[in-house]
Structures are given as structure tokens and as C-alpha cells.
Amino acid sequence: MGKCQENNILKMTTPNKTPPGADPKQLERTGTVREIGSQAVWSLSSCKPGFGVDQLRDDNLETYWQSDGSQPHLVNIQFRRKTTVKTLCIYADYKSDESYTPSKISVRVGNNFHNLQEIRQLELVEPSGWIHVPLTDNHKKPTRTFMIQIAVLANHQNGRDTHMRQIKIYTPVEESSIGKFPRCTTIDFMMYRSIR
């Protein structure tokens, strides 16, 4: 994947098809990140009835959000307090969605709607799978923000409405201040890592 710096915006482009990233659940199993989308308030610029936030967050790759209006199509993710975010994962499937598949996405962060700054712009070519978007600065340091906005600026084949199948947001897991403990990442350990 090629990268170019332009006006402090990292553009991620691919000459051919956008390669799929790893399943985000693999990231969680490493013990270095955790998904925090449930801690946020989600809103959309528009949606067809029955194709809204619930479908975007239901862990089912067969369901999707479908916009219903003019571009840009927006997904707004607002946290109650300033939150550290490291990675954004979006699932897109060109084979299923064709002209509804995003081809140009802008990711913005800020304190509220009035001071959002674009930190990533992606050009996607027939994506099929998870797209991992780093939400880090030039020094690989995670971003601290109250709000993330994902803007679909264009679709494949000049499609009007868009489909997004899933969105996940990850924060880094902080080391214990008491001391460093070994990470327990095997399936046997993961089954018993929390109190039920």
C-alpha cells in the first residue's frame, strides 16, 4: 500500500485492489487492544429504515448500513470523555455491494462537530474485507479525541448511496501500574480472563 504526505494528511492509496486486513478479532486476541465502540454514541447522516447503526454494529458481515441521501455520507462516533483511539476497522465488500461500496473515505477527529480535523483519507479500489485505518500521529502515538467522523466522499461507479457492513474502534490496552504481567493470549487463558 503506497503512502504519500500531502498537507499533513496521510493518503492511503493502492494501485490495484485494496487488500483485506486481518480480522479485528485477531487484534483483540493479542491483548494489546480492545474494542470501545459500545462506549460511544453513534449517529448517521441518513439511513434507509432497517439499515442503520444497529446493523453497522451487530457483528454480522451480512448486514449493513445503507445511506439515504446526498454525499458526503457521515458516521459520527461521539465519546462521553476524551478517549484514546488507535485503530479504526471498516468492513467493505465490493463483490456484494458494487456501486454502493465506498471508494473515497475521510476520517476526521475533534472535540465536536465544529472543530473536526481530517487525519486520514483513503482511496479504496474494490475492497473486500477489513480495512485497518491507523488513528495515530506521525510518531505512531494514538489519538485522543471526543469524536470520530467517517465521511464517505465517493462510491465505486459513481454510486449515490453507500453500504458499510461493520465498523470497529480500538484503544490500546495500558500496562498495569503495579507491574508488568505476562500477556495471556492462548484460547484457554482468554476463556478465564474475566469474572462472569
Image (spheres, rainbow, N blue to C red):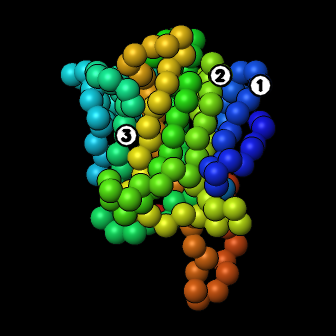
Expressed as whole percent of the image width and height from the top left, the position of residue 78 reads: 33, 55
Residue at 53 percent across and 11 percent down: it is 157
Residue 54 showing in the rendered view: no
Residue at 29 percent across and 35 percent down: it is 45
How many angstroms separate mark 1 from mark 3 (CA)?
27 Å
Label 1: few (<14), some (14–19) or many (≥20) C-alpha neighbours in 10 Å? few
Disc 3, disc 2: CB below 8 Å?
no
Which quadrant of the figure contains the C terminus?
Answer: bottom left
User: Which mark, by number, is residue 75?
Assistant: 3
The amino acid sitting under disc 3 is Val
Instruction: Give whichever of 103, 175 is nearer the camera.
Output: 103
Answer with the quarter of the image where residue 4 lies. top right
Q: Mark 1 points at which residue?
A: 15
Name, please, the residue furthest toward the left.
Answer: 49
Answer with the quarter of the image where residue 62 lies. top left
User: Which mark, by number, is residue 131?
Assistant: none
Expressed as whole percent of the image width and height from the top left, the position of residue 85 reads: 51, 60
Instruction: Give whichever of 99, 88 is nearer the camera.
Output: 99
User: Which mark, by number, is residue 125?
Assistant: 2
Residue at 32 percent across and 53 percent down: it is 113
* In-image side of 130 versus 169 (left or right): right
